[in-house]
């Protein structure tokens, strides 16, 4: 069984981006800039945004991190986003999710200028993903596709089964796989007889956040398994399948699998960096 090493590929992507950024900075006399906004003091979210900022700094992307108090109102958050929308030297804006319950996530995401929406969650980018190669693609699905291609996993004509229908992963992942000429089935919490469908998946992508949801009996022989899930069990990060009690049988049955950690996670960060550089390049072209 092959391990799909996201950590190694993410490192290569960062090296390439660092070289590209150095060249672009000399040409345009400014670095790419990302602004990250976090509302609240959730330790996990703080860790996520600090990791994103660190990754930006490592390759030459300027990154401003604003950690706002939990009591921040929706109007205050929208005012900050509007200010960043109007700053010509701000290329990308990222609002860390989830937001506090008193803030409407949909309203906030729609307030971000879609040209600066590095998460690819603005309705304009969601729509463009269906019809145009110019969409900003959500980071996790983009990272998964990059990893599959880098590992020479055939996609055209394959049956891809996706467990999860979130706007962040499941839905855009389905669109990307359709663009790559796969046949796609999307499953979710209301799906009946889940095993019947997963057993058909030549590429199985699990993005539902439910530890040990899938066992070896639910896999097709020779399947490529992408485990997006992140679960904390006794202080240890595990996925939705790879670290299950059935891991030995899974390894015997699957042709390839992503580990947790070290699989999809690093690729998500690498794809965010790619998105920041892409919106920066579009911005400086418009300035010329």
Image (cartoon, rainbow, N blue to C red):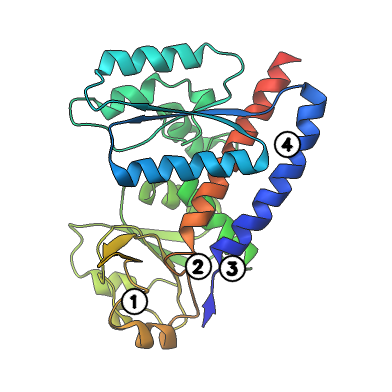
Task: Choose between 204 and 13: the one closer to the eye.
Answer: 13
| Residue at the spot of label 2 | 158
Among the two numbered marks 2 and 1 on one chain, the one whose residue lies closer to the N terminus: 2
Whether residue 121 is situated above or below residue 163 in the rendered picture: above
Of circles 3 and 4, which is in front? 4
Direction from residue 138 to residue 102 in the image, left or right: left
| Residue at the spot of label 4 | 21
The secondary structure type at the circle numbered 1 is: loop
Among the two numbered marks 3 and 1 on one chain, the one whose residue lies closer to the N terminus: 3
Residue drawn at (53%, 54%) of the image: 267
Alpha-carbon span between mark 3 and mark 4: 31 Å
Task: Choose between 256 and 277: the one closer to the eye.
Answer: 277
Does the residue at mark 3 contact the one at mark 2 (Cβ under 8 Å)? Answer: yes
Q: Residues within 10 Å of mark 3 (few under 14, many from 20)?
A: some
Direction from residue 64 to residue 238 in the image, left or right: left
Task: Choose between 56 and 16: the one closer to the eye.
Answer: 56
Identify the image quadrant of residue 42.
Answer: top left
Direction from residue 23 to residue 5 in the image, left or right: left
Residue drawn at (75%, 40%) of the image: 20
Does the residue at mark 3 contact the one at mark 1 (Cβ under 8 Å)? Answer: no
**Quadrant in which the C terminus appears:** top right
Alpha-carbon span between mark 1 and mark 4: 44 Å
| Residue at the spot of label 1 | 199
Residue 204 placement (x, y as % from top left): 41, 67
Alpha-carbon span between mark 3 and mark 1: 18 Å
Residue drawn at (47%, 59%) of the image: 264
């Amino acid at each position: 069984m092959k391990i799909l090493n996201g950590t190694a590929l993410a490192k290569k992507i960062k090296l390439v981006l660092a070289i590209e950024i150095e060249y672009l900075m000399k040409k345009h006399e400014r670095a790419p800039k990302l602004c990250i906004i976090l509302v609240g003091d959730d330790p996990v979210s703080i860790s996520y945004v600090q990791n994103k900022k660190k990754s930006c700094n490592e390759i030459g992307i300027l990154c401003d991190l604003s950690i706002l108090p939990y009591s921040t109102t929706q109007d205050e958050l929208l005012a900050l986003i509007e200010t960043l929308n109007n700053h010509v030297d701000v290329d990308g804006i990222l609002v860390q999710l989830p937001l506090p319950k008193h803030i409407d996530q949909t309203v906030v995401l729609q307030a971000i200028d879609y040209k600066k929406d590095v998460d690819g969650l603005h309705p304009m980018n969601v729509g463009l993903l269906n019809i145009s190669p110019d969409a900003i693609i959500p980071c996790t699905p983009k990272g998964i596709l990059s990893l599959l291609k880098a590992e020479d996993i055939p996609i055209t004509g394959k049956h891809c089964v996706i467990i999860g229908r979130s706007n962040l992963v499941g839905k855009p992942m389905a669109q990307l796989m359709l663009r790559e000429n796969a046949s796609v089935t999307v499953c979710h919490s209301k799906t009946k007889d889940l095993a019947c469908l997963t057993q058909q998946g030549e590429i199985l992508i699990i993005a539902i956040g439910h530890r040990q949801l899938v066992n070896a009996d639910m896999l097709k022989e020779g399947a490529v398994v992408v485990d997006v899930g992140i679960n904390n069990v006794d202080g240890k990060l595990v996925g939705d399948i790879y670290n299950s009690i059935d891991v030995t049988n899974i390894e015997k049955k699957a042709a390839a699998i992503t580990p947790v950690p070290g699989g999809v996670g690093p690729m998500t960060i690498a794809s965010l960096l790619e998105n920041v550089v892409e919106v920066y390049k579009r911005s400086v072209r418009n300035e010329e």
